[in-house]
Image (tube, helix red, strand yellow):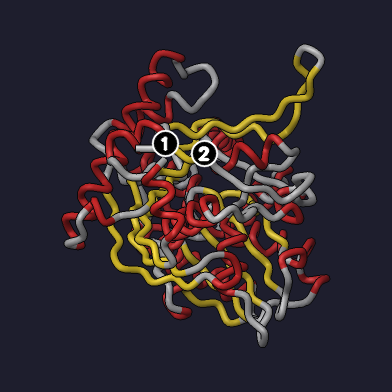
Amino acid sequence: MKRLEEVLKKENRLVIGLMSGTSLDGIDTALVEITGSGRGTQLRQLAFNTTPFPKGFKEFALRNSQTGTSDVADIARLNFLIAQFYADAVDDLCTRSGVRKEDVDLIGSHGQTIHHLPQRTDMFGKSVAATLQIGDPSVLAKLSGVLTVGDFRVGDVALGGQGAPLVPYFDYVMFRSEGATRGLLNIGGIANITYLPKGCGPDDVFAFDTGPGNMIIDQLMVRFFGKDFDQDGEIASAGSIRNDVLEYLMKDEFVHIRPPKSTGRELYGEHFVSALLRKFEGITAEDAIASVTEFTSLAVYENYSSFLAVKGNVDELIVSGGGAHNEFLMESLRRHFYRASVKPAEEIGISSDAKEAICFALLANETISGNPANLKTVTGASRNTILGKICLP
């Protein structure tokens, strides 16, 4: 408790944020200096690193994220194993940045989502929704020796929310503008958008998952080429967008559901890709990847035009996540959002790759500062609430 008391007294804190997303590409680790909290937060990125998972881990984790192939013993062990990987990533970042781990005040860890079930179902007389992020923050706190906050999504789901997206709070604190209406689009495994009307307050923020981000693209790249992703969109650029494939994909129910909404591998996992390839047997790899990349972009625009444009057109669409490096995808977004300035997050002073890790550093700081960090207008929760579990080293 003494360590928590010491950190609470500090005006400036060194915080590490950890994020491993649905794509399971590796562990993004960001070191930031945070001053203050809430709307007055000031943040400076000091270091960033991505630590790859061991060979074969991605396939093992994905198998245990799906109904029918998961094993409860494997999930229990993964909960501890991933925390060990996170602890190693913290050590690596501290070594690379020249910062002593003893000087780090706080870790904010998203954890690894293996199942996300925000839609309620009746069980034994109760209405139950659920989300499960593993890589236990208590294990991480003990291994790292650093005060750790994790399990951010659970509290929101407990109050009737989707538990996602949580990045919009970070977007609101850091990127609200008095002069421009901004859309903050993050394209990880899943794509999500935050809508910030110029001069907005917290209740004016609107955000939700739009559908797949890189998830379908990445799975096709593995199937056809044995590669994890489409580097710079080169494969998509070599193919043609098949209108019949795009028409089929745009019938996807999730794209058209009214927010609040969130999704994950439960919807756009292996079964989705298998059904697509059965439907369009014989499609070339290049055409398949071009078509699903266009689907990612068009799904974003369809959600924007259906649910956001009525509130006012965006002046800027700021893109982060791995998708910001896919030139085919970025050009598609520019084509659809032709009235807006479409640009990567670097142009407003933040790393496209580091953004989500930085977000969870900020969310950890909000937790120990006693500030609610979900937005009920975004997640659908009954109220704004303090998120996460504080775990002592």
Q: Nearer the viewer, residue 72 or 139?
A: 139
- Is disc 2 surrounded by few (<14), some (14 to 19) or many (20+) residues within 10 Å? some
Q: Nearer the viewer, residue 176 or 389?
A: 389
Residue 304 is tagged as: none
Q: Disc 1 on helix, strand or loop?
A: helix
* Residue at image location 75% in from the left, 16% down from the top: 123
Position of 130 relative to 174 (above/below): above
Residue 299 occupies quadrant: bottom right
Q: Nearer the viewer, residue 194 or 67?
A: 194
Q: Nearer the viewer, residue 49 or 305?
A: 49
Tell me, yes or no, if residue 220 can be seen here: no
Q: Label 2 to label 1, Cα distance in Å?
A: 8 Å
In the picture, which quadrant includes the C terminus? top left
Q: Disc 2 on helix, strand or loop?
A: strand
Tell me, yes or no, if residue 272 can be seen here: yes
* Residue at image location 56% in from the left, 59% down from the top: 294
Position of 121 relative to 200 (above/below): above
Residue ID for mark 1: 137
Residue 112 occupies quadrant: top left
Q: Amino acid at mark 1?
A: Pro
Position of 269 relative to 250 (above/below): above
Q: Are circles 2 and 1 on residues that touch, CB within 8 Å?
A: yes
Please state the horizontal and vertical placement of residue 125, each as a whole percent of the image: 81, 15
Residue ID for mark 2: 389
Please state the horizontal and vertical placement of residue 139, each as a whole percent of the image: 36, 31
* Residue at image location 73% in from the left, 38% down from the top: 159
Q: Sequence-wise, which precedes: disc 2 or disc 1?
A: 1
- Is disc 1 surrounded by few (<14), some (14 to 19) or many (20+) residues within 10 Å? many
Please state the horizontal and vertical placement of residue 369, each as a whole percent of the image: 54, 56
* Residue at image location 42% in from the left, 21% down from the top: 75
In the picture, which quadrant includes the N terminus? top left
Q: Amino acid at mark 2?
A: Lys
